Image (cartoon, coloured by chain):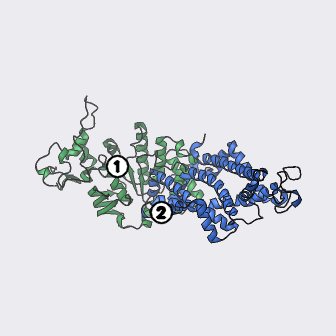
Amino acid sequence: MSSNPTTQLPYRKKSLWMNAWKRLTKNRMAMLGLGIISLFIFAAIFADYIAPYRYDEQHLDKIFQFPNKEFLLGTDQNGRDILSRIIYGARISLQVGFISVAISAVLGCGLGSVAGYYGDKIDNVIMRVMDVLMAIPNVLLAIVIATTLGPGLQNLMIAVGISSVPSFARLIRASILSVKGQEFVEAARLVGCSDARIIFRHLIPNVLAPIIVQITLSMALSILAASTLSFLGLGIQPPIPEWGAMLSSGRMYIMDYWYLVTFPGIAIAIIILALNLLGDGLRDALDPRMKK
Amino acid sequence: MDKILKISNLKIQYCTDDAVVYAVNGVNLELERGKSLGLVGETGAGKTTTALGIMNLLPDPQGKYIDGKIYFNGEDIIKQSIQTMRKIRGNKISMIFQDPMTSLNPIMTVGDQVSEVIRLHQKVSRSEATIKSQQMLELVGIPGERYSEYPHQFSGGMKQRVVIAIALACNPELLIADEPTTALDVTIQAQVLELMEKLKKEFNTSLIMITHDLGVVAEMCDKVAIMYCGEIVEYGTLRDIYKGAQHPYTIGLFESIPDLDTKVSRLKPIRGLVPDPSELPPTCKFANRCSKVTEECTKADPLVINVGGIHTVKCHYAKVVD
């Protein structure tokens, strides 16, 4: 090969992630979302130092307190500080949100892309199983899995994760189908790429946008689904706080003490909003064609 | 001379639920190392299918090899395992697609796409592959600084250069160019062809040029095969075909090119349409469009007649020249 003196030094190449990060930092809303999420994660990790009380500390003489100086967001029916419980609750809720979505995203991506790429029989088998799972309502499915596995945080995350695998698999299969007919996939095969390489290096990066949107949306749903399970006694056991469980236990007093449900609800709303902002920004940042 | 590729009696069919499409019907071809062959024919003549057949990448599950052998360096491609084929593709045999706009991955930098091929086939480190792919890019006339740019930041001609860089990155022995200039405008066509010509000489690569542009063939190739309905109707050196074409189809192709010197108000097309490839006549496939058709043509399939040198014609009325 002819070597040109100007090419002796390798040109410093910028990685996809560095570029994406650069674009992301320029998106204010996404950074706001990232900031809020980091704040929640920080609070969850350092809950022991930040929270004014322990999550199970009861002040039985001060139940149903309206927000005041002593209890910034009030107290619940057992006289526990709502602010502290929200801060501790972030631990469980965020874990459940992230990990269960990670489970469903990984499984769903794997199954969906294999089904979409190979088509034919493999596709049929995988998608029919997914259809069966989809025929059962999400929460019901999660209940079945959770009952089989037994209560506990880990099983809760598995149950919630598995119950949303089918929607991921469907979405990714459809996206892969639309991309795989394009010529660059054939070109990749022509240069000797293996199937696995084509799926992971060429196809999945091309369908990241819908995956990210689905991840941010199902993160919210997972937190709620987890709380449903907790409410049924299949998830987190009291007194460990969790946002969804706080909502459902405060629900009984909503007419007289609205702040019992409002603040955990706001916490969920804020984290979901932040996730959506970040997801939107990520989707734009990861698509090189959006570069201005 | 040492033959890099020898195709004998290749038959490929596409089997769909309600019809069998006879895409390639007994093609014989030979290509010497470092030489180039032009494969000319109209849309649907089986040119691309032949090329995909050489790559052992027929559309799955419809495409099927029915008969014939494809020897690449003496080994039958059809019998190779998937793993061996994967090592051959992109390494020993490369292919350039028609449309550079769609044959690059839109979300990978062009540099990464070049180095991917290098890393797939050569045991080099990431940084060595980067250097090498940069050299490749520079070789096809793209500045190395554009390594981390994405395909959408390049023009059509530049993208085709990237595609050529990918195809030649591993220094293949055989390059199949499937209408490499069809999607480009004329000025860029010339540049790309020139580049391919130059690189072909530099790397001593053999070339199969698939096109319907006889002008491109005249410029690039040593030998020409004219395809019609999955058969090679005429085969010979450039001179044989351009000066002494015998098959009525070849003559028709030349006549349909407008002449610059004489003023014509209408082009002269070959009348009629290509027969349905799922219902090919057992006789001469060109008979229904041929201007010199006789009764014999609709009765028997013509044999391939050698009319002198390597020049062969598949027509009842081919005449031996001396």
- The residue lying at 57 percent from left, 62 percent from top is A107
The residue marked by circle 2 belongs to what chain?
Answer: A
B183 lies above or below A216: above
Quarter residue A86 falls in: bottom right
Question: What amino acid type is highlighted by mark number 2?
Answer: Arg
Q: Is residue B34 visible?
A: yes
Quadrant the C terminus of chain A occupies: top right
Numbered disc 2: secondary structure: helix
Q: Nearer the viewer, residue A119 or B94?
A: A119
Position of residue A251 in the picture relative to residue A141 (left or right) = right
Numbered disc 1: secondary structure: strand
Chain identifier, green in the render: B
How crowded pointer 2 is (Cα within 10 Å; few <14, some 14-19, many 20+) is rated as: few
The residue marked by circle 1 belongs to what chain?
Answer: B
How crowded pointer 1 is (Cα within 10 Å; few <14, some 14-19, many 20+) is rated as: many
- The residue lying at 18 percent from left, 44 percent from top is B290
Percent x, y of residue B230: 27, 53
- Frontmost of labels 2 and 1 is 2
Q: Which residue is mark 2?
A: A128
Position of residue A107 in the picture relative to residue B203 (left or right) = right
Chain identifier, blue in the render: A
Question: What amino acid type is highlighted by mark number 1?
Answer: Ile
Q: Nearer the viewer, residue A117 or B48?
A: A117
Quarter residue A54 falls in: bottom right
B67 lies above or below A22: below
- The residue lying at 62 percent from left, 52 percent from top is A217
Position of residue A47 in the picture relative to residue A178 (left or right) = right
